[in-house]
Amino acid sequence: MMKRIILLLGFYLFTFSPFHLLVAQDMAHYKRVVKELASKKYQGRGYAKGGANKAGKFLEKEYQRAGVDEVTLQPFMLDIQTFAGKMEMETLSNSPLKGEEKEASPLRGGWVGSWKKLTAGIDFSMREYSPGVKGEFPVYHVDTLHFDADKMFADLAKPEYKNCLVACEFWFTYKHREAFSRLQKAGECTNAGLIYTWPAPIKFFKAYGHRVVDKPIVWVTPEAIEGVQRVRLDVDAKFLKGYECFNVISKIEGERHDSCYVFTAHYDHLGNLGKKIFYAGANDNASGSATIVTLAAYYAKHRPKFDMYFLAFSGEDANLRGSTYFVEHPTFPLEKIKYLFNIDMIGDNNPVEYCEVSDAGMKAFPLFEKINGEKHIFKELHRGDLAANSDHYVFATRGVPCIFLENEKGDAFQYYHTIYDNWEHVVTDSYEPTFRLVQSFIEAY
């Protein structure tokens, strides 16, 4: 009799209490997908070594295993600059020799000291729209305290700075874009290129890799370039034109077909920086890709009221290319979307969840807040301004009700777009609450 009571109590707790929501999430499945996508096999899910497409094929199989009704691949093409070859940088910091000392010096240019080799991905990286570069260059350090653009260009016209690299803190160049954009163009100045400083950990980007400027641009940590007079660079670049990618589109049929829910996450990342370095992208965005896979697995077993689509996009880090192609060539009417959830970078542990909501999605946002407060899922939902920072944006500008969910500024956030965004540094704390928030909203909406 006691055994029966215990079994009945267990059944009651599972069926009628919030506990049944907890078992809906599959942490083991989530971790397996994140770890797989962040592994060496996919080389940072970029383009030079085919990692993005390999990851897309893996996800196609994952959705099939999850039990979805349909999986299709939507091909599209992009142009992208890549850096999968030589990636070498050396610096020389001491003073030049003079007179007879210079004549006797075995060093090119007569400079004292030894060359220091920098480490790609730690001390330096390349701006995504930079061309390749090979050579030895003097360095001109911009005086940011007493900056005068005319004086800078006059200095750069001097013989000693011919073919130099202009070094400056990135945000300072951003404030003086007109002057520094001239330094990127052939014929505007005799400088060979630019060096932008960025605090460690050094970052790498892809958003504007669809074009290549005239002169090389190198990112370095301030410590790596401080006091440096000369630099040696040997960097290979290859521009891929018309590179073939694809979105992975999965569907679960609901009881009704007049409206649908959509889940999106991008599976591509930054790829390679040289022959040995790759950007694993465990948080960005293996975490989101794994989340929507497990959501698909859940709804395949618990048939929804409305159709559900799971859109795994490629080309997001290359300026939202996959999602842009989709909204221009939708496989179902965008007007049917009841609500869209874009999940990007939730591999962290901040108790406050960041979100962005489209104008059309704001009507339902109070429901998100109500559910979150009543179920104590996140400490708070912090809503930011809508920005073109992830795939939800192209849907938002077309009137689709949508929300962007990201867990930022936790322990893992500092590593995004660095070589440290890997399986060792990703945090799984936000997976279950994000899953619960989305699932609870669909149940109540």
Image (spheres, rainbow, N blue to C red):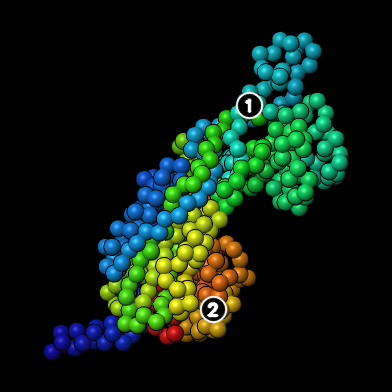
Q: CA distance from mark 2 to mark 1?
A: 53 Å
Residue with the most extreme left position? 1
Amino acid bearing label 1: Gly
Amino acid bearing label 2: Gly
From the top left corner, tell me how far across and down residue 227 is, in percent. Answer: 72, 34
Tag on residue 135? 1
| Residue at point 37%, 74% (across, down) | 308
From the top left corner, tell me how far across and down residue 392 is, in percent. Answer: 52, 67
Q: How would you rate the neighbour count of disc 1 (Cα within 10 Å): few for under 14, some for 14-19, many for 20 or more? A: few
Callout 2: SS: loop
Task: Answer above or below: position of 289 versus 8.
Answer: above
| Residue at point 71%, 10% (across, down) | 104
Q: Which residue is mark 2?
A: 361
Q: How would you rate the neighbour count of disc 2 (Cα within 10 Å): few for under 14, some for 14-19, many for 20 or more? A: some
Q: Nearer the viewer, residue 370 or 227?
A: 370
Position of the C terminus, as image quadrant, is bottom left
